């Protein structure tokens, strides 16, 4: 395994949690490298369901050290709720590590995200978890990091400094109530004691692990098309879910990555605003949404649903350098007489196979479809490629050929055992 990365190949929610859980069996470290509590992973093991937002789901394996690396932004209020719920389910958190360089998502970040999203004009449809404002402060170099949290005076100084800038915006731009620095310092000093046992120098921890050939699994959140630079800006998240982001977020050098897994649904979904060429706003879309239970883990929002977009998937394969694909939720497509896959975009009288990242330009694209025959049978019990109906295999072969990356895992249900292929 050496260093493997799992990346969402679409607009997030590709069921990466399950793939990470499978790959974690042979990992020594499982590392979250970007995003924050905007993410949501659900893992089902032996009938129990575990929900993760910040803590890497690899923690469920007793041989794994679960790491929240420096590229992640961390909301300590939400972390504390998540940690308590997992402890209650009997999960041992002593194998958790949190980077000194992790930026904290503070209550004013969440508030600013909510206030901005309340404006109709220019709304992104964010998860309102304060992600954009946290990364903005990081880039502006006024952010508060875990390292600051551990020393009360330093924490007080950082919070006072940032509130001098953020409170006037909260008050004058949005007409909302400013935050009290002393109350925040008090509250966050308490969190410092909760997380102190887990804090460490993550880049060094991982560099040593790489040098000792210990297997590392980097767990992506969101998806390639939500990448701040390579997604459909401005309808993106504020971090880098792509494979390059795994290096930035952990301190592990690019030439150390050995396996890059792309995880894609057998169809496409998107949450929030932004262009979506293959979107289905009809009965077929409704049927896929219901069969796939396409409602957000974090926000409960109904996801937008559409046919598989191979132009976008091939782009994701090229941007990330996928070495393997995992196709998830294939079982959702059972029972459709015909299936469409987008093989090109039609724009201004010509056709292209190149993805268009610019949001207004993508919105003008029309999908060009290939039609494939569907299959009637339920496939949730299938465990080998031979168990699959011939048309399901043909569908997968079509994807593999178009994208040029081998499909090594196929998921036909939420359970660990509902998987075809080996890791
Ligand atoms: P933010 O990350 O909350 O700022 O939201 C920015 C965009 O990313 C919005 O369209 C969100 O719906 C989307 N987004 C953020 N996290 C996820 C996720 O885990 N799955 C799917 N979409 C996400």
Image: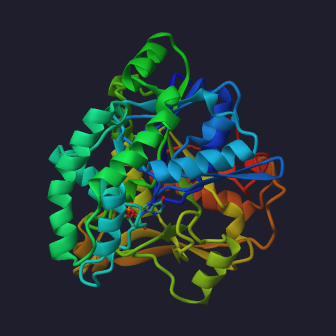
Question: Going by the image, does 351 lie left or right of 12?
Answer: left
x and y, in percent, of residue 113 in the image: 32, 67
Q: Is 398 placed above or below 158 here?
A: below
Q: Residue furthest top?
A: 212
Picture quarter with ligand 1? bottom left
Residue at 46% from the left image edge and 42% from the top image edge: 191
Q: Residue furthest bottom?
A: 282
Front-lying residue, 422 or 72? 72
Can residue 83 be seen here? The reply is yes
x and y, in percent, of residue 54 in the image: 51, 47
Front-lying residue, 100 or 331? 100
Residue at 61% from the left image edge and 27% from the top image edge: 95
x and y, in percent, of residue 107 in the image: 36, 58
Front-lying residue, 47 or 306? 47
The C terminus: image quadrant: top right
- Rendered image quadrant of residue 366: bottom left
Q: How many marks?
A: 0
- Rendered image quadrant of residue 61: top right
Residue at 44% from the left image edge and 62% from the top image edge: 11
The N terminus: image quadrant: top right
Question: Going by the image, does 170 lie left or right of 402?
Answer: left
Can residue 34 be seen here? The reply is no
Q: Is 133 placed above or below 302 here?
A: above
x and y, in percent, of residue 233 in the image: 26, 64
Q: Is 30 placed above or below 135 here?
A: above
Q: How is the image coloured?
A: rainbow
């Amino acid at each position: 395994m050496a260093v493997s990365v799992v990346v969402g190949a679409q607009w997030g929610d590709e069921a990466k949690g399950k793939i990470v859980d499978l790959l974690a069996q042979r990992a020594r470290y499982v590392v979250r490298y970007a995003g924050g509590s905007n993410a949501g992973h659900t893992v089902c093991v032996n009938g129990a369901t575990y929900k993760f937002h910040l803590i890497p789901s690899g923690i469920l394996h007793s041989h794994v050290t679960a790491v929240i690396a420096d590229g992640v932004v961390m909301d300590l209020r939400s972390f504390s709720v998540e940690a308590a719920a997992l402890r209650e389910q009997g999960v041992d958190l002593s194998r958790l590590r949190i980077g000194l360089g992790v930026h904290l998502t503070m209550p004013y970040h969440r508030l600013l995200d909510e206030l901005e999203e309340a404006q109709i004009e220019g709304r992104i449809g964010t998860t309102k978890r304060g992600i954009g404002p946290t990364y903005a402060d990081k880039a502006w170099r006024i952010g508060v990091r875990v390292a600051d949290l551990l020393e009360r005076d330093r924490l007080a100084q950082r919070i006072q400094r940032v509130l001098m800038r953020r409170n006037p915006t909260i008050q004058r731009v949005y007409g909302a109530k400013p935050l009290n620095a002393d109350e925040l310092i008090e509250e966050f000093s308490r969190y410092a004691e909760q997380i102190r046992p887990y804090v460490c120098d993550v880049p060094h921890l991982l560099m040593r692990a790489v040098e000792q050939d210990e297997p590392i699994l980097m767990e992506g959140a969101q998806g390639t098309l939500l990448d701040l630079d390579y997604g459909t800006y401005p309808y993106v998240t504020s971090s880098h879910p792509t494979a390059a982001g795994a290096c930035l977020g952990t301190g592990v050098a690019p030439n150390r990555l050995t396996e890059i897994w792309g995880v894609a649904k057998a169809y496409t979904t998107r949450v929030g605003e932004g262009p979506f060429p293959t979107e289905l706003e009809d009965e077929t879309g409704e049927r896929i949404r219901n069969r796939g239970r396409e409602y957000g883990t974090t926000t409960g929002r109904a996801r937008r649903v559409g046919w598989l977009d191979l132009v976008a998937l091939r782009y994701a394969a090229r941007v990330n350098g996928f070495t393997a694909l995992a196709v998830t939720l294939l079982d959702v497509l059972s029972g459709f007489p015909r299936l469409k896959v987008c093989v090109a975009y039609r724009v201004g009288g010509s056709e292209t196979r190149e993805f268009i990242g610019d949001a207004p330009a993508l919105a003008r694209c029309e999908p060009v479809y290939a039609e494939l025959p569907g299959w009637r049978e339920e496939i949730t019990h299938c465990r080998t490629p031979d168990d699959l109906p011939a048309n399901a295999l043909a569908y997968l072969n079509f994807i593999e050929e178009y994208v040029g990356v081998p499909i090594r895992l196929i998921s036909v249900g939420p359970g660990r055992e509902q998987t075809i292929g080996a890791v």
